[in-house]
Image (cartoon, rainbow, N blue to C red):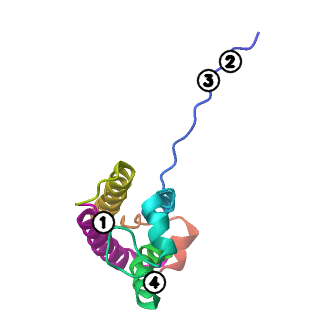
C-alpha cells in the first residue's frame, strides 16, 4: 500500500521588475474601471453628451483630451519601462512617478462624494505607494560568487 504525501509546492522568487510592472498594470485597471463605472452615473453621461466633464467646468475638447492622454501616458509607459530600464534608473523613475501619481489621485478625490470613486482612488494610491516602497527597497545586486580553482584542476594549469 502506497502512502500519499501531500504535494509540496515550491515558492519561486519573482523578479522586482515583474512585480513593479504587474502593479502598474493593476493600478491602470483600477483607474480605467473607476472611470468606466462612472458612465453608469446619469450626471456623467449627461455631461459627456453635452461635451463636458461632470462636476467640473471643463469642456471635452481637443485640449482636454490631449491633457488626459498626457496624464495617463506615464503610468501606461511604466508597465514596459519597469521591465526594460536598468535597476538604478528604474528605481528612481518608479519612486518619482508613483509618488507624483499617488499625490495627484489623492488630491483629485478630496471633494468626491461617490463612494466607489473614493474606494477606487484609495486602492490606486495604495498600489502606487506599494510601487514606491518596492522600488525604494530594491535589493542591491548580489556579488558574483568567487571562483575557487584547485591547483590540480586543468583550469588552474592553464592560468599559469
Q: Nearer the viewer, residue 29 or 91?
A: 29
Mark 4 or 2, nearer chain start? 2
Mark 1 or 2, nearer chain start? 2
Quarter of the picture containing the N terminus is top right
Pointer 4 and pointer 2: residues touching (CB < 8 Å)?
A: no
> Over which residues does the magenta segment extend?
84-110
Front: mark 3 or 4: 4
Q: Residue at x 47, y 76 (%)?
A: 50
Q: Is residue 15 visible?
A: no
Q: Secondary structure at mark 4?
A: helix
Residue 145's place in the image compared with 158, above or below, is above
Q: Which residue lies under the disc numbered 2?
A: 4
Q: Which residue lies under the disc numbered 3?
A: 6
Q: Residues within 10 Å of mark 1 (few under 14, many from 20)?
A: some
Work out how far the residue at label 4 is from the one at label 1, CA to CA, in angstroms: 18 Å
Q: Which mark is residue 18?
A: none
Q: Residues within 10 Å of mark 2 (few under 14, many from 20)?
A: few
Amino acid at each position: 500500500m502506497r502512502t500519499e504525501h501531500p504535494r509540496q509546492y515550491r515558492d519561486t522568487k519573482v523578479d522586482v521588475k515583474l512585480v513593479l510592472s504587474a502593479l502598474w498594470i493593476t493600478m491602470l485597471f483600477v483607474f480605467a474601471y473607476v472611470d468606466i463605472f462612472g458612465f453608469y452615473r446619469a450626471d456623467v453621461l449627461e455631461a459627456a453628451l453635452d461635451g463636458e466633464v461632470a462636476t467640473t467646468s471643463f469642456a471635452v475638447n481637443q485640449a482636454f483630451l490631449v491633457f488626459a492622454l498626457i496624464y495617463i501616458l506615464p503610468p501606461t509607459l511604466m508597465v514596459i519601462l519597469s521591465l526594460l530600464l536598468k535597476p538604478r534608473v528604474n528605481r528612481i523613475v518608479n519612486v518619482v512617478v508613483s509618488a507624483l501619481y499617488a499625490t495627484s489621485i489623492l488630491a483629485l478625490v478630496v471633494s468626491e462624494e461617490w463612494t466607489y470613486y473614493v474606494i477606487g482612488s484609495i486602492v490606486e494610491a495604495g498600489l502606487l505607494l506599494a510601487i514606491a516602497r518596492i522600488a525604494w527597497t530594491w535589493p542591491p545586486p548580489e556579488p558574483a560568487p568567487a571562483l575557487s580553482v584547485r591547483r590540480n584542476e586543468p583550469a588552474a594549469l592553464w592560468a599559469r
